[in-house]
Image (cartoon, rainbow, N blue to C red):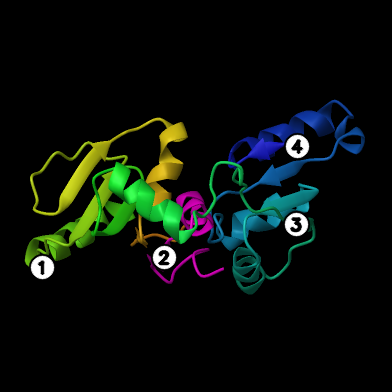
């Protein structure tokens, strides 16, 4: 089993063949991206020399069959998983109690959670908040080192994973303005499972 390391496959295949081991092995490749990674010339060798490709979404598979002339290996879809014992929706009363406990009573809460990289689109959201301040609307930002002072924005930085569910559960909207073709937005699934309305970019694996 190989995860995302395309470069290792030719050397692995040659090693197995040179040692008369190829027929004794199956190569299963997990790809966590979305668009086809290899150009068509390299893809022909790759897909002829692995036994199974695991993708995160059906839409990603559709992109692969559209791009390559031939996909001789087996394909399967295996989405990322979350723990539903941790990420679940609160009923209305419990949510209001949590809002009051966390000092957000009467506020509409938006949440953004990701790594601190431009392609995650946080800068777009922050610009909107600067242009349209509203005392009844709060944005919670998790996972970034940004400490800029912006009215209505709370930067929590990096927090333990065990604390994530309560922030999703207390929030009303989850923002996922990614600027890249995400393979599978794990935080998006976490937020959906906690009952957030999700506003997201229509690219990559997001729509599925």
Which dot marks residue 198? Answer: 2
Whether tag 2 and tag 1 are in contact, CB under 8 A, the answer is no
Instruction: Choose the circle earlier in sequence order: 3 or 2.
Output: 3
> Is 37 on the left-hand or right-hand side of 79?
left
**Magenta stretch bounds:** 184-208
Which dot marks residue 13? Answer: 4
Label 3 CA crowd tier, 10 Å (few <14, some 14–19, many 20+): some
Which residue is pictured at 34% across the width and 42% down the height? Answer: 115
> Is 87 on the left-hand or right-hand side of 44?
left
Between the C-alphas of marks 3 and 4, the distance is 21 Å
Res. 177 image quadrant: bottom left
Q: Given this view, does label 1 or label 4 mark the residue nearer the observer?
A: 1
Label 4 CA crowd tier, 10 Å (few <14, some 14–19, many 20+): some
Disc 4, SS: helix
Q: Residue placed farthest to the top in the image?
A: 19
Which dot marks residue 132? Answer: 1
Instruction: Choose the circle earlier in sequence order: 2 or 1.
Output: 1
The residue closer to the viewer here, 75 or 117, is 117
Which residue is label 3 attached to? 76
Disc 3, SS: strand
Q: Given this view, does label 2 or label 4 mark the residue nearer the observer?
A: 2
Q: Given this view, does label 1 or label 3 mark the residue nearer the observer?
A: 1
Which residue is pictured at 35% across the width and 32% down the height? Answer: 159
Evaluate whether residue 109 shows in this view: yes
Disc 1, SS: loop
Task: Please state the horizontal and vertical placement of residue 116, each as a whole percent of the image.
Answer: 29, 43
């Amino acid at each position: 089993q190989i995860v995302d390391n395309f470069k290792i496959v030719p050397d692995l295949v040659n090693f197995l063949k040179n040692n008369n081991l190829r027929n004794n092995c199956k190569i299963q490749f997990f790809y966590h991206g979305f668009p086809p990674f290899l150009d068509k010339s390299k893809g022909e060798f790759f897909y002829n020399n692995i036994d199974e490709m695991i993708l995160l979404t059906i839409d990603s598979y559709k992109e692969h069959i559209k791009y390559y002339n031939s996909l001789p290996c087996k394909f399967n879809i295996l989405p990322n998983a979350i723990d539903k014992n941790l990420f679940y929706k609160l009923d209305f009363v419990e949510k209001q109690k949590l809002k009051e406990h966390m000092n957000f009573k009467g506020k509409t809460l938006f949440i953004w959670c990701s790594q601190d990289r431009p392609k995650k689109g946080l800068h777009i959201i922050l610009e909107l908040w600067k242009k349209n301040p509203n005392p009844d609307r709060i944005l919670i930002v998790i996972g970034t080192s940004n400490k800029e002072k912006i009215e209505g924005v709370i930067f929590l930085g990096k927090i333990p994973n065990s604390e994530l569910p309560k922030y999703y559960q207390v929030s009303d909207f989850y923002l996922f303005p990614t600027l890249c073709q995400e393979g599978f937005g794990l935080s998006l699934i976490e937020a959906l499972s906690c009952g957030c309305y999700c506003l997201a970019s229509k690219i990559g694996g997001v729509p599925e």
